[in-house]
Image (cartoon, grey):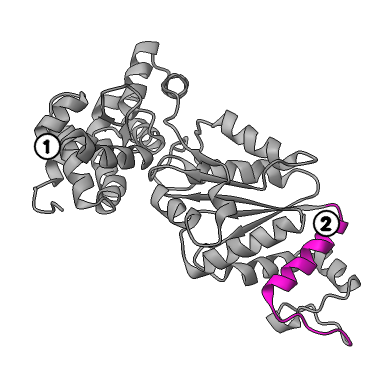
């Protein structure tokens, strides 16, 4: 039996992917340039927008490039020590560190040379190890998925700033939700991160989703286009609708109920829980106004423009609302209107 090519798991690289070619190529091109103009990129977007998939695709492509070392770090761990540990676990580098007389025994990393003073702070240790990496003509890509502002993360990014200032070949690619990336960018002493490029993942191309569904399910153009429109370009919805359509032998109409419920349970519940009471109220206004016109939504909410605008902008930045058409607002997530109307009871107003 042929395996289902779509996945219901967040972050897993599925069998069917709509690649973000332009953004992916841009990051790889900048990082691999002989004189790179940037050493940091951040990917942000709503849950399920494909941040982890894009990160995985970039890692996969850069792993096969000559002279690149990929270090993936857990944002909840001791990032500096974990980075040192991973660099020292590479046999070629471990030998080079010993030739350079670097003693990292203080960190329990096994690089212990008699007669050499142990390095006792992680910042100095990273400076020494990356100087050795530079001498060997290599570059290091640090990948952090779902970054958030924490003491360990702020310490790591501040140290990264020092490493970059010393012209060391270290590059950073992070993903994170809008609020988490924003909090990290606005932390004290991290102005370099505030200026770093941030790519907000836009919806996937409806045309490319339709093409994928047409080829996988062998349906006509009209049916494929109908399926693609249902996803609204939301990456997770593309996978979920594809998965349940596959389970129903290519009949997407039979898959709609399961698709809707799965999105509600495994994506929208979490997104909803992270919204402020007033964000929820504005979402209810969008869902219940019966029109995408901002004027009608304001009327429904009894809000003036100055009151509504901050919440409108925040929902747009979070990737929940589309404000591309002047004077209009609409949800970017499929079935989200139904979710809001089912879950908003008016008792959590600010």
* Residue for point 15% across, 32% down: 298
Residue 149 lies in magenta, yes or no? no
Residue tagged 2: 134
- Horizontal and vertical percent for residue 173? 59, 49
- In this view, the residue farthest toward the front is 306
* Residue for point 46% across, 52% down: 181
State the CA–CA distance, disc 1 to disc 2.
Answer: 58 Å
* Residue for point 49% across, 47% down: 12
In primary-sequence order, the first of circles 1 and 2 is 2
- Horizontal and vertical percent for residue 205? 45, 24
- Horizontal and vertical percent for residue 80? 63, 69
Q: Eyeballing the image, is 307 above or below 182? A: above
> Can residue 147 be seen in the rendering of this structure?
no
- Horizontal and vertical percent for residue 261? 23, 41
Q: Eyeballing the image, is 186 above or below 228? A: below
In this image, 3 relative to 300: left or right? Answer: right
In this image, 199 relative to 4: left or right? Answer: right
- Total number of numbered discs in the rendering: 2
Residue 129 lies in magenta, yes or no? yes
Residue stretch in magenta:
115-137
Q: Eyeballing the image, is 258 above or below 249? A: below
């Amino acid at each position: 039996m042929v395996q289902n090519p779509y996945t219901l798991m967040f972050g897993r690289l599925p069998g069917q992917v709509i690649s973000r070619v332009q953004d992916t190529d841009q990051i790889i091109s900048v990082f691999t340039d002989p004189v790179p103009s940037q050493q940091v990129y951040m990917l942000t977007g709503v849950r399920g927008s494909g941040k982890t998939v894009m990160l995985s695709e970039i890692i996969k492509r850069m792993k096969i490039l000559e002279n690149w070392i990929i270090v993936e770090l857990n944002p909840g761990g001791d990032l500096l020590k974990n980075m040192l540990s991973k660099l020292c676990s590479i046999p070629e580098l471990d030998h080079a560190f010993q030739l350079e007389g670097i003693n990292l025994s203080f960190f329990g990393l096994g690089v212990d040379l008699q007669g050499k003073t142990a390095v006792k702070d992680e910042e100095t240790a990273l400076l020494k190890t990356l100087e050795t990496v530079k001498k060997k003509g290599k570059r290091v890509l640090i990948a952090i998925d779902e970054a958030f502002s924490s003491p360990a993360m702020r310490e790591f990014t501040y140290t990264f700033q020092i490493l970059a200032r010393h012209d060391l070949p270290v590059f950073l690619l992070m993903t994170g939700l809008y609020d988490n990336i924003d909090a990290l960018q606005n932390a004290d002493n991290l102005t370099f991160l505030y200026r770093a490029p941030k790519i907000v993942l836009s919806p996937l191309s409806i045309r490319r989703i339709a093409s994928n569904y047409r080829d996988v399910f062998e349906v006509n153009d009209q049916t494929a286009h109908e399926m693609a429109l249902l996803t609204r370009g939301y990456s997770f919805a593309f996978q979920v609708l594809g998965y349940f359509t596959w389970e129903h032998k290519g009949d997407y109409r039979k898959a709609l109920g399961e698709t809707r419920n799965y999105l509600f349970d495994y994506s929208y519940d979490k997104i909803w829980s992270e919204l402020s009471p007033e964000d929820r109220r504005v979402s209810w206004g969008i869902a219940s106004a019966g029109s995408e016109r901002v004027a009608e939504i304001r009327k429904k909410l009894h809000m003036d423009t100055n009151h509504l605008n901050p919440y409108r902008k925040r929902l747009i930045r979070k990737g929940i609302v589309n404000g591309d058409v002047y004077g209009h607002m609409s949800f970017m997530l499929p079935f989200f209107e139904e979710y809001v109307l089912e879950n908003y009871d008016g008792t959590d107003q600010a």
